[in-house]
Amino acid sequence: MKIEDYALIGDCHSAALVGRDGSIDWLCWPRFDSCACFAALLGTPEHGRWRISPEERATTRRSYRESTLILETEFETEGGAVTLIDFMPVRGNHCQLVRLVVGTRGRVAMAMEFILRFDYGASVPWVTRLPGGDGIRAIAGPDLVVLRSPVPLEGKNLTTVARFEVAEGERLPFVLAHAASHLELPRGIDAERALEETQKFWEKWCTRCQLSGEWAGIARRSLITLKALTYAPTGGLVAAPTTSLPEMLGGVRNWDYRFCWLRDATLTLLALMGGGYYEEAGAWREWLLRAVAGSPQQMQIMYGIAGERRLPEWIIEWLPGYEGSAPVRIGNAAASQLQLDVYGEVMDALHQARKQGIGREDTSWDVQRALLEHLETCWQEPDSGLWEVRGPPRHFTYSKMMCWVAFDRAIKAVEEHGLTGPVERWRELRARIHGEVCRRAWRPQLGAFAQSYDSDELDASLLLLPMTGFLPATDPRVRETVEAIQRGLTVDGLVLRYRTRRTLDGLPPGEGLFLACSFWLADALCLLGRADEARALFERLVRLCNDVGLLAEEYDPASQRQLGNFPQAFSHVALVNTAMNLSAHAKPAEQRSGEKAA
């Protein structure tokens, strides 16, 4: 099944991917970063899945209920029609997943196959019937799962199966619940009531959305997706609910994205605030401050959803990977890299929040000053860059530019908000960094700012140059850099991050087009006054969304398939911000850069 053939359901603690065929092929419980109990996405059905579908051939159509994360898959057969309603109720004492089979026409023979495998498909649970006879319980080590349904369930070859018929007007629920195995069994819930409450939750949340205009619908769907990728207890936002979906089919660029990146901070804040979600923006700010608290020398580029720092990377040998794309990785070794741009991202995010009156300063300014003191000692070092290359460290231009941003936002905090600090020293450092970047990264023969000092490689991150305020969009070097990227880093009009080479990132070359970068190109075109081009590019990117409005990390124009972890928060953040940049709404590109579009 293609990556874009999946849809997302979730409860702001975890999430599941549901295929067009009615199969749940990915679910980690009880948190986004927990071990998967359905891992067929990265292997075979034997690694865990839960499928409910007609026995006979059917055509499929699906959609979310408006303003919700409730998925409805409609199966049309020769003898009738059935709707499968999938959702995860707002978290109570236990995590629950509900599947409701609704007969809408005629009579349809249905089949259910339930293959539960804990620990990413490795552990076969011990399954017994519930005392009341209305379902089963499955236990393996610390995990317990209960499946309840009025439909008779039968064990067969280490799986649970059922065959049943549903007639027009019938509604048959299947309720799955997870708990720690040493605790009492989760109590059963009323599926219909849970559906009603879940719908009310999402509809109420959507009433806060302030977006309007031509693209409000697709942008609102992206905001719902971002909410679903938020870990409610802490406010952290995972980059994606999946691991190891490949950036090139059959390749090795397969990473675990179930963590929170500091790099996403500013653009995420702007998207949430622009959509009217100040509560979520405030929770993200607080997560950010808690995560970076501590010794500035130990600040990481990513953390766990509760701020965990140890994210060791290891390989699951028993999973073959999505369409054979191995290895399957758990954890992310990039957490230990030096990536200087995150200092600028943190300072900029807190600056944007301060401008909007989000959060109190309390000790946060002390934390920011400590980060700046450390940055003064290390900004001249080479790093791994925002693309987290696994080759030798370099003096990446974007990293240095974001060091400039860090000191620039600190100066603005003093000048515009009355905070205290060694502003003259910061001004001197800001000017020094700016001069060095312009001297060493601008390459006249390339007609652009280069990826790193003294190189001749292009990099899509430099599309963000005018958005950060480093140079105004009217500067000829900005226009030339954008045009050079359009000439040298686009395939069929969409943008590559950079030209992948083993010498740069230590990996075999080849990956898809990075969707966020294409949105950044549209943003840059907006600031350059080329609104018609920006609009055309945005409309094309929107058409790449799957049938329920979701985007992965990358896109392959040759196979016309989405690639990478899915759905990708950064792609949806970029979509929301570009939609606002093209509308009469508050424009994130102008908010961040401090200048109006040409």
Image: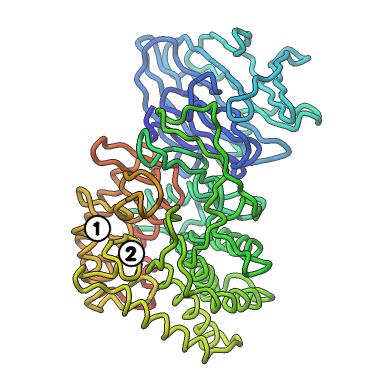
Secondary structure of the residue carrying tag 2 is: loop
Q: Name the spot of residue 112 as percent of width and height, x first.
A: 53, 15
| Residue bearing the label numbered 2 | 451
Q: Name the spot of residue 359 as percent of width and height, x first.
A: 62, 70
Which image quadrant: the N terminus?
top left
Secondary structure of the residue carrying tag 1 is: helix
Judging from the image, the colouring scheme is: rainbow
Q: Residue at x 41, y 58 (%)?
A: 211
Which numbered tag is attached to residue 220? none
Amino acid type at circle 2 is: Gln
Report whether residue 566 is seen: no
Q: Residues within 10 Å of mark 2 (few under 14, many from 20)?
A: many
Amino acid type at circle 1 is: Arg
| Residue bearing the label numbered 1 | 535
Q: Earlier in the sequence, mark 1 or mark 2?
A: 2
Q: Residue at x 45, y 19 (%)?
A: 82
- Compared to residue 224, the image places residue 245 above or below, namely above
| CA distance separating discs 1 and 2 | 27 Å
Residue sitting at the far bottom:
424
Q: Residue at x 25, y 49 (%)?
A: 540
- Compared to residue 581, the image places residue 8 above or below, namely above
Direction from residue 41 to residue 486 in the image, left or right: left
Front-lying residue, 405 or 130: 405
Q: How many callouts does the rendering have?
A: 2
